[in-house]
Amino acid sequence: MYQDKLASLKKQLQQLEDGIHPEYLKRVKRLEHQLHERLRLNKIYKDHMYEVVDREYVAEKKAAAKEFEEKKVELQENLLSDFEDKRKMIESERHSMELNGDSTEVKPMMKRILRRRANEPAPAPEKRRKPLATALTFMLDDRDIDADLRAIARAEPPRAPPPPPPRKRLSSNNSGESPVRENSDTTDTRVEDGKLLYDRRWYHRGQSVYVSSTGRELGRFPAHIHAITDEAIWVKKTNLERIRIYISQLARGKVTIKRRAS
């Protein structure tokens, strides 16, 4: 029995060295199957990540183009406003120059005096015109007058202030509920150190929120905060579309945001 067992072990050892042992082949086949499966899953994951990155790139490109168009329109409007202000200033300066009189006096043309003929009667003596005694005296200099004219041109009719909203009484009961807060026109909203303070809560970049608006432009949708600037915040929807929300819109209540579980 010993010799038979020893011979069997030597045979198995020889098969293992030759790479034809049944148990060895079985385990190698199992490892190869695991290798192929992992390679297949890695390829699927790589293709998926390529698609995600490609979609995000396309969305970022569209957002950049949209922002470029908005900035271009804003720049055109600013330039037109500047040109309009300069035009009004030039017109006011021209008007003030007409009031003050032109400093460059036009000299009269020299007339040629011809010799009087023998039968021609002598010309009547020309009557001298009396100088105009009326003259305008200004108490302000030209710069003050121009500033006043520009202020008058830009001034708008005063608007009556809106009536104050009616105050609501604080209601309390014995159940321990918190009192009802009074309505206000604006919400304390500001940006500090790259974080947004809105409705007594701090919001940071990457936080998941719900966005809703009073109009029909935005509606209500889930998103997360993509960027925070001094003037606006950028939120990114689930379809990778970026939307800009101004701080003034949050303060006036036109757009509201609420936290949500990420």
Image (cartoon, rainbow, N blue to C red):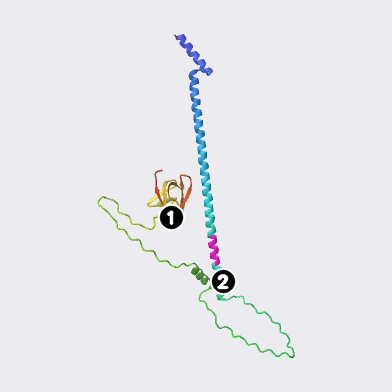
**Mark 1 residue element:** helix
**Mark 2 residue element:** helix
Residue 98 location (% of width, % of height): 56, 74
Hey, what amino acid is under mark 1?
A: Gln
Quick check: 186 left or right of 124?
left
Residue 162 location (% of width, % of height): 38, 63
Quick check: 137 left or right of 128?
left
Q: Residue at x 53, y 45 (%)?
A: 58
Magenta span: predominant SS is helix
Q: Which residue is mark 2?
A: 94
Quick check: 125 left or right of 24?
right
Of label 1 and label 2, which has the lower sequence position?
2
Whether 152 is drawn above or below 23: the answer is below
Hey, what amino acid is under mark 2?
A: Arg
Whether 38 is drawn above or below 15: the answer is below
Q: Which mark is residue 125?
A: none
Q: Which residue is mark 1?
A: 249
Residue nearest the viewer, comparing 239 with 201: 239
Whether 57 is drawn above or below 8: the answer is below
Confirm whether the magenta stretch covers residue 82.
yes
Whether 208 is drawn above or below 75: the answer is above
Residue nearest the viewer, comparing 32 with 117: 117
Residue 17 location (% of width, % of height): 52, 17
Quarter of the image for residue 133 reads bottom right
Residue extending farthest to the right is 118
How many badges with numbers are in the image? 2
Residue 85 location (% of width, % of height): 53, 65
* Quarter of the image that includes the N terminus: top left
**Where does the magenta region start and end?**
78-87
Confirm whether the magenta stretch covers residue 118.
no
Badge 1 crowding class, 10 Å Cα cut-off, few under 14, some 14 to 19, many 20 or more, is some
Q: CA distance from mark 1 to mark 2?
A: 42 Å
